[in-house]
Image (cartoon, grey):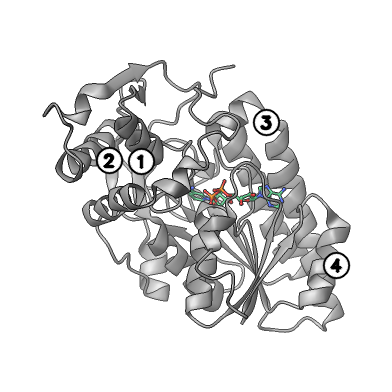
Amino acid sequence: MKILVTGGAGFIGSAVVRLAISRGHEVVNVDALTYAACLANLDSVSDNPGYSFEHVDIRDRDALNAVFAKHEPDAVMHLAAESHVDRSIDGPADFIETNIQGTFNMLEAARSYWTAKGKPEGFRFHHISTDEVFGSLGAEGLFTEDTPYDPRSPYSASKASSDHLVNAWHETYGLPVVLTNCSNNYGPYHFPEKLVPVVILNALAGKAIPIYGKGDNVRDWLYVEDHADALLLAMEKGEIGRSYNIGGENERTNLELVESLLSILDDKRPKADGSSYKDQITFVADRPGHDQRYAIDPTRIRNELGWRPSVTVEQGLELTVQWYLDNEDWWQALLDRKGVGERLGVKA
Ligand code: NAD
């Protein structure tokens, strides 16, 4: 298939592009190259004849129309978004413009292209979303596809809005959409503003390792390459108009996750003085409106599409730490980007 991937220079998008190319698909990567993008994520595929790049902002509807007309994709996988909750607290406008207006532009560009083509049956518009649209869980329960939406941050509210638009374009115009909502990802090429890379890089730099609040917020962690695999499966085999929750069934408190990462680092790169990286853990003021717990019930994608993650969280964290130890050039080049290394999201 020829797949138009938006946000392919980001963390998850680049994993999707690499996997799609390795499976013989053609990929057109549409990315505005914001602060979160890194074209080096695509070095392994950039010379592949099946890969092409369009430096386009999804807020620019005319440019999107031109991309559809030029490349004539068989499917769209829409990942481009502002993705960092802390940045959404300090500056929500970008989230409204890219995540809501940008998704509207993508839907309209896809709809006019699909209509002009005679509404081919195989066409898919796959919208990639987050479990954060469902809000915050107490100690019990899991998010299913039927859980009511209850977003609580500017980021999750903008993603929830985009999900509603996607469903409306299916119901109203018949656009063949598939929607996925995934839990927290981790793995190679994770931009160094998110928890997992911050922990690894601060540990290596001998800096304080910040934990929000008491570190008791619970997330359900999934290795990014397993997410990419689930996404390609949903795009190829998902039922039109259906949504699929994707999660690793690996719930950890933030403190447990951080301690696991630091134990792996203690083994792989012991400190010269024999102390543990865990001594660098520092508890800091909590994120405003910090959701307490997310947990996904992935029964639907498992039973209907046969998806299973390939690694446990222990294996995935080990692979991730090793990747950051082996790829210092990649992350060193990102440390001077705006906001990296700063505490964001406390302006509320
Ligand atoms: P990311 O921030 O690493 O990458 C986002 C990419 O989108 C970047 O390459 C950026 O340049 C591009 N982009 C941003 N605004 C754009 C615009 N206006 N026009 C074109 N390109 C633009 O994000 P990620 O973590 O890879 O997340 C990708 C998608 O997956 C997002 O839609 C996010 O909501 C969703 N998601 C993420 C997670 C997670 O744990 N990271 C979990 C579930 C769902």
Q: Position of residue 289 (x, y in %)?
A: 50, 24
* Residue in the picture at 31% in, 47% down: 325
Q: Nearer the viewer, mark 2 or mark 4?
A: 4
Check whether the beta carbons of the residues at disc 2 and disc 1 lie within 8 A of each other: yes
Residue 46 against residue 123 in the figure, above or below: above
- 330 or 290, which lies in front? 330
Q: What element does badge 1 sit on?
A: strand
Q: Quadrant of residue 272?
A: top left
- Residue 190 visible here: no
Q: Nearer the viewer, mark 1 or mark 4?
A: 4
Label 3: how many Cα within 10 Å (few below 14, some 14–19, many 20+)? some
Left or right: 325 in relation to 119: left
**Sequence-earlier tag: 2 or 1:** 1
Residue corresponding to mark 2: 252
CA gap, disc 2 to disc 1? 6 Å
Left or right: 47 in relation to 326: right
Q: Nearer the viewer, mark 3 or mark 4?
A: 4
* Residue in the picture at 60% in, 56% down: 79
Looking at the rendered image, the quarter that the N terminus falls into is bottom right
CA gap, disc 3 to disc 4? 29 Å
Q: Is mark 2 within 8 Å of ligand 1?
A: no
* Residue in the picture at 36% in, 41% down: 219
